[in-house]
Image (cartoon, rainbow, N blue to C red):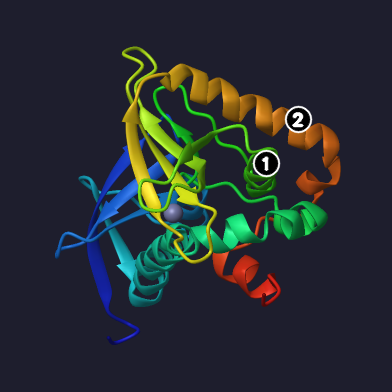
Amino acid sequence: MNQTETIVVEALFQPETEVYQLIDRSGRVTHVRKDLIVDNKLDLIDGQLLLTAGLYKSWFKLEELARQDEALFRANIYKFYQHRAYLLAHPELCNKYSNKFGAISYVSSNPCLGALAFSFSKGERVVDCPLCGSPSHLYFAVGSVLSGTSTQSFICENEACQNDHVVRTGGMSKVVDYFNKIQDAYMNLYPTTKEFRSKSFSSILEALPAV
Ligand SMILES: [Zn+2]
C-alpha cells in the first residue's frame, strides 16, 4: 500500500459510547474513539471519512490484534485456573477486564482477572466435569436476567482432563450477583490492583511461571 494513498471508509457514530464504527470497502469493521477522529482532523462527509494509508493500517489492524489477544483467554483458560494463587499474589497482572469472563447479560458483571482468580480459589461455583467427574469451575456466563436462562462455562480442575464445557441452566441473575460480590470482595482484599496498568492477555501469560 502506497503511504500517500487515501482510503474511503464508511463512518457511523455511536453516541452512547462516543465511538465511530468504521467499515471499509471489503466490509472490515473497526471502532475508533471520537477524540482520535478529532485529533487527526478528519472531516466526516456524507457519512464517509478519508483516511491516510497509515491511519487505515493502524486502526484496522489494532482491532484485529485486540481480537487475537482476547481469543488467548479461552485458549488458555486452564492456565489461568492453574495459576490462580500466583495471580492473587501478583496484583500487577490482575487489572484486566474482558468480555470473555464474568457474566454477560443486559445487566453484566465484569470482574477483573484477579477477581476471577479469587473465585477459582474459593471454589463456590463448581459442577462435576461430565468427562472425568472432577470439580469444574465457573468462569463465564451469558444469558438473560429477565428469563433467568444462562449458558455457563466451566473449566475442569483435573490437569489430565482440562475439559472446558458449558451447562445450560437457570439462575442468570444469581450469577451476575455472584460475580459482583466476588469483584467487591477481591477489591477489598487487593486494593492495589486498580493502580496498575491493564495488560494484554499475551503479556499476562508470559509473566506466569512454567509449572
Ligand atoms: Zn474433567
Give the quadrant of ligand 1: bottom left
Q: Give the amino acid at mark 1.
A: Ala
- The residue pinned by badge 1 equals 115
Q: Give the amino acid at mark 2.
A: Ala
Q: Residue at x 69, y 47 (%)?
A: 114
- The residue pinned by badge 2 equals 185
The quarter of the picture where residue 115 lies is top right
Q: Tell me the number on the disc at residue 25.
A: none
Q: Residue at x 42, y 71 (%)?
A: 58
Question: Left or right: where does residue 108 sit relative to residue 130?
Answer: right
Judged from the image, the secondary structure of the residue bearing numbered disc 2 is: helix
Query: Quick one: label 2, few (<14), some, or many (20+) residues within 10 Å?
Result: some
Q: Residue at x 34, y 21 (%)?
A: 144
Question: Left or right: where does residue 39 sit relative to residue 16?
Answer: right
Q: CA distance from mark 2 to mark 1?
A: 8 Å
Front one among 110 and 125 = 125
Front one among 24 and 123 = 123
- Quadrant of the snapshot with the C terminus: bottom right
Query: Quick one: label 1, few (<14), some, or many (20+) residues within 10 Å?
Result: many
Residue 102: x %, y % from top left: 51, 38
Across the whole image, how many numbered discs are drawn on residues?
2
